[in-house]
Image (tube, rainbow, N blue to C red):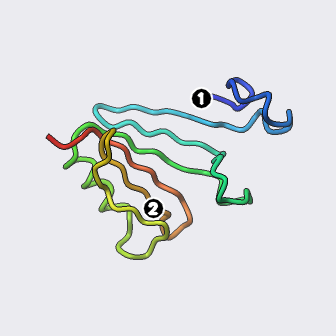
Amino acid sequence: MTKLGDSPMKAMFPTEKHDWLINANLKSGKIEISATDWMASPEFNPKQGNTTAIFVIGEEFDELKDVFDKLKDGDNNTRLQELHELPFGMYGQFYDKFGVQWIFKGDKPA
């Protein structure tokens, strides 16, 4: 786990925010899950419930796409970006029906 106060950004923020987690990481096989309780996106005003995200990182597109499709809950989500290819690999995101932000990143499909 990495706290804001343990990062190079700590001087940019008041000390009361230094205990916020900017990253926690779990890995099992080829799937990696990271989470944060603080999003630094300038388009969001921080309030309880919109400052968290779960990152799912995988190697194989089909495996990542399967997890993405199972979690996205059809069309009942906001800020949906289907899993798609970018220069660095695959990327997709959404907020689920509970307001949890999910961000997916994977290698480029073979």
The label number, if any, that marks residue 9 in the structure image: none
Q: Which residue is tagged 2?
A: 94
Mark 1 or mark 2: name the one nearer the start of the chain: 1
Instruction: Say which element carries label 2.
Output: strand
- Image quadrant in which you'd find residue 28: top left
**Left or right: where 41 falls relative to 10:** left
- Looking at the rendered image, the quarter that the C terminus falls into is top left
Whether residue 39 sits left or right of residue 19 in the image: it is left
Q: Residues within 10 Å of mark 2 (few under 14, many from 20)?
A: many
Residue under numbered circle 1: 1
Near-viewer residue (37 or 45): 45
Q: Amino acid at mark 2?
A: Phe
Q: Which residue is depicted at the point 61% across and 51% down?
A: 52
The answer to whether mark 1 and mark 2 are in CB contact below 8 A is no
At x 62%, y 28%, the residue is 2
Q: Give x and y (percent) for residue 16.
A: 85, 38
Residue situated furthest left in the rendering: 110
| Residue 76 falls left or right of residue 83 | right
Query: Which residue is outermost to the bottom?
Result: 75
Which residue ends up furthest to the right in the rendered image?
15
Residue lying at 46% horizontally and 54% vertically, measured from the top left = 102
x then y, percent, for residue 53: 55, 50
Percent position (x, y) of residue 103?
44, 50
At label 1, which amino acid type do we have? Met
Q: Marks 1/2: CA distance?
A: 23 Å
From what the image shows, is residue 57 above or below residue 76? above
Element type at mark 1: loop
Question: Image point 37% across, 40% down: which residue?
Answer: 57
Q: Residues within 10 Å of mark 1 (few under 14, many from 20)?
A: few
Work out which quarter of the rendered image holds the N terminus and state it.
top right
Going by the image, does 42 lie left or right of 91?
Answer: right
Give residue 87's position: percent from left, percent from top: 31, 42
